[in-house]
Amino acid sequence: MNEQFSKKSEAWSARFSEPVSDLVKRYTASVFFDHRLTSVDIQGSLAHAEMLAHQKIISAQDYADIQRGMTQIQAEIAEGKFEWLLDLEDVHLNIEKRLTELVGDAGKRLHTGRSRNDQVATDIRLYLRAAIDDISVLLRALRMALVDLAEKNADTILPGFTHMQVAQPVTFGHHMLAYVEMFGRDAERMADCRKRVNRLPLGSAALAGTTFPIDRERVAKTLGFEDVCHNSLDAVSDRDFAIEFCAASALIMTHISRLSEELVIWMSPRIGFIDIADRFCTGSSIMPQKKNPDVPELARGKTGRVNGHLVALLTLMKAQPLAYNKDNQEDKEPLFDTVDTVIDTLRIFADMAAGITVKPQAMREAALQGYATATDLADYLVKKGLPFRDAHEAVAHAVRACEQRGCDLAELSTEELRQFSELIGPDVHQVLTLEGSVAARNHVGGTAPEQVRLAIQRVRSLLA
Ligand code: ARG
């Protein structure tokens, strides 16, 4: 990989009396990773040059030369012919140097009224804005896939758990919609973060602004920024927008990780609630019977690195005095890896969710164990006039009796159930069925199939 970064060129200005060692060059260079910013760097430079020409700070001819040079540089990069030089430290100096080789003095004028400090801050914002847009599209695709799965399973019943113990029956549709809510909030967070990303640092120059008669609004408009950053010291130094992005990403991955955990458990042959398409699983090199849910497991694991990147950026920013410090060069690798990980993960999950096979029989059998309708029996007694705490106690006795006999509440006859409360009548059996239990929770946010269908309609219209 480092082969592509050759090492010729001299020490980099008259100010220096000795060149830095090769080790220091390698240590301080960022071109190995920030060349990913090439296209946004060129986009930002062109907008800056256009403004300089408009303000008559450079000539129209200079601007035309800069445009021509940048077009050629883009072509060279696309063809893999661009020579990245380690000695030129980063993407910005590499491009500027090549531009000057190609178009002469116009290339040297590009940096008028600008610094790498406001340049790099602008590049990261442009890069991140595009990443947020990609992530938003993928979050939508994932929610659509989950909504489709929910719709197919609006009536499928499985046990809902608390403390990993059977609690109450829920519909699988309802369970999937819980994740749709989580990813919906993730999308809101991304959209909110985008507002603060989408502001222009250019014009701040190194830290204090510039003596040239620049037009920052013009550059902001050209680049599609909603506003300019209103303090030059802040604009070149703070990376809070990137930290916010990493926090929003960490939450996406946290939600992915929770879903992954469930997929892994549900796919375990001991549980067998679902199956995942073979293309997301691998076998074992020694145990022929295995089909391992590698993708959800890896996603669960990758959550660790994304959470780690958030902490890396917070730690990077902490205790940095105003204004720009080289520490900030370290923002890129965590940020890029966050973007790559989130994008790949969402892409895979949207596809994987669409291919989940649900096994309603196994879910049903599990829901029939563990006295999942005990709360329904207590609610039934309350509706007949018993205070809830007494109802709770009566049902606890019934559950205990069932445990001793090794049967479910629904298997007791009305007469047997009446031992625990005189209020129990023949209408009790409707309440003890799984269908009766879920259908009874028929309010906004409840698990009833009717509510699941309404919730699906709501989400679909939000996503339309
Ligand atoms: N490569 C640098 C970075 O990523 C660009 C800004 C350098 N500025 C400076 N004053 N050394 O942050």
Image (cartoon, rainbow, N blue to C red):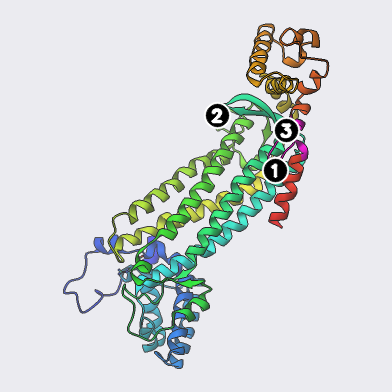
Q: Was residue 443 drawn as part of the magenta stretch in this picture? A: yes
**403 left or right of 27?**
right
Q: Is residue 206 above or below residue 416?
A: below
Disc 2 and disc 3: Cα gap in Å? 48 Å
Magenta span: chief secondary structure: loop
The Cα atoms of the two marked residues, 2 and 1, are separated by 27 Å
Q: Quadrant of ligand 1?
A: bottom left
**Which residues are the magenta region?**
438-450
Residue 302: x and y, percent?
49, 44
Residue behind mark 1: 355
Q: Position of residue 436 (x, y in %)?
A: 78, 27
Is 91 above or below relative to 364? below
Find disc 2 in the rendering and name its residue. 286
Report whether the residue tagged 3 is closer than 8 Å to ligand 1: no
Name the residue located 46 percent from the left edge and 89 percent from the top edge: 54
Q: Report whether residue 176 is seen.
A: yes
Q: Mark 3: which secondary structure?
A: loop
